[in-house]
Image (spheres, rainbow, N blue to C red):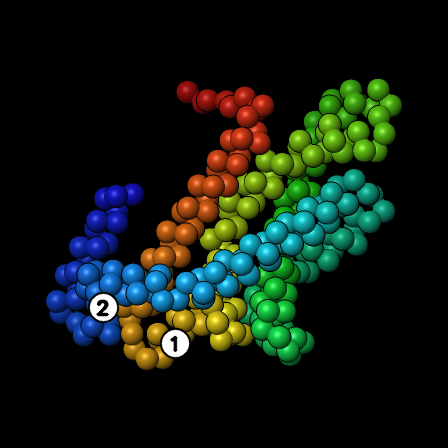
Amino acid sequence: MAVVVGVLILAMEVASWYVQPFIMPSPAVVLRALWADLTEDIGHIGITLLRLFVALACAMLAGVTIGVLMGTSARLRPYLRSLVVIDTGIPALSWMLVAVFWFKEPEARIFFILTVILLPFYAMNVYEGIRAVPKDWVDMLESFRPSRWQVMRFLIIPQIVPYVLLTTKSLIGYATRMVIFAELIASAVGIGARMGLAQSTFKMEHVLAWTFFLVIFNLVAQGLVGLAEKRLLRWRAEASVR
């Protein structure tokens, strides 16, 4: 990681010697812009992160619920699965344009866009996780005549937790890109809106500064999910392939 970052910084520095600053500023200029953005636009950062976490949490809750219903209810499975498959086939840009027509408030637009885009990932992964439950486990648990809640507690929930965490870890970067794109189109506040303003005023150093901030945020968020994964799944032995 350090080698790659060093090479990128060196390439930026060399490129800044031969092109205009609005095309490629030097790393020092970008660093000063990053400091200015972090100190002056902290409110925009908070708004973007709040939007991201709320939408991700709601998409997780709804997606896991749908995935569990798909995996446990034969009556609802074909209908819910069809809805999820149709949702995955709709481009993100289409949802963004639809949200502009359907919702007046920017917050509602962004929440709707993120939720409908992220929800299918949770639903399908949880569904596949339930399908992966070994039949022997099901037969063993049913021999004790468990209640519906006991099946959920001792079989379904432990089985889907790794899938939910893996989906979250995989979606953080994608969700971040989506919220920035949504803010660029449908909002006047947030990191996406600030990046749009920097682009329109030819302040390339601020565009790169925000980009570096989002990369760092993505690494930190994935690290936090990884820590949660180790804590929640500490009961599960890790296999090592030699």
Residue at coordinates 24% horizontally, 74% vertically from top-left? 22
Position in image of residue 149 (x %, y %): 81, 33
Position in image of residue 148 (x %, y %): 83, 33
> Foreground: 218 or 137?
218
- Residue 228 circle label: none
Please, what is the three-letter code of the amino acid marked with disc 2? Met
Label 1 vs 2, first from the N-terminus? 2
Residue at coordinates 21% horizontally, 49% vertically from top-left? 6
- In the picture shown, does residue 157 fall above or below 13? above
Please, what is the three-letter code of the amino acid marked with disc 1? Leu
**Residue position for label 2:** 24
- In the picture shown, does residue 159 fall above or below 38? above
Q: Nearer the viewer, mark 1 or mark 2?
A: 1
Q: CA distance from mark 1 to mark 2?
A: 17 Å
Q: Label 1 neighbourhood size at 10 Å, few (<14), some (14-19), many (20+)?
A: some
| Picture quadrant of residue 11 | bottom left
Q: Label 2 neighbourhood size at 10 Å, few (<14), some (14-19), many (20+)?
A: many
**Residue position for label 1:** 197
Would you say residue 94 is visible in this rendering? Answer: no
Side (left or right) of 222 relative to 93: left
> Foreground: 238 or 232?
232
Q: Secondary structure at mark 2?
A: loop
Position in image of residue 10 (x %, y %): 17, 55
| Picture quadrant of residue 156 | top right
| Discs 1, 2 touching: Cβ within 8 Å | no
Quarter of the image where the C terminus is located: top left
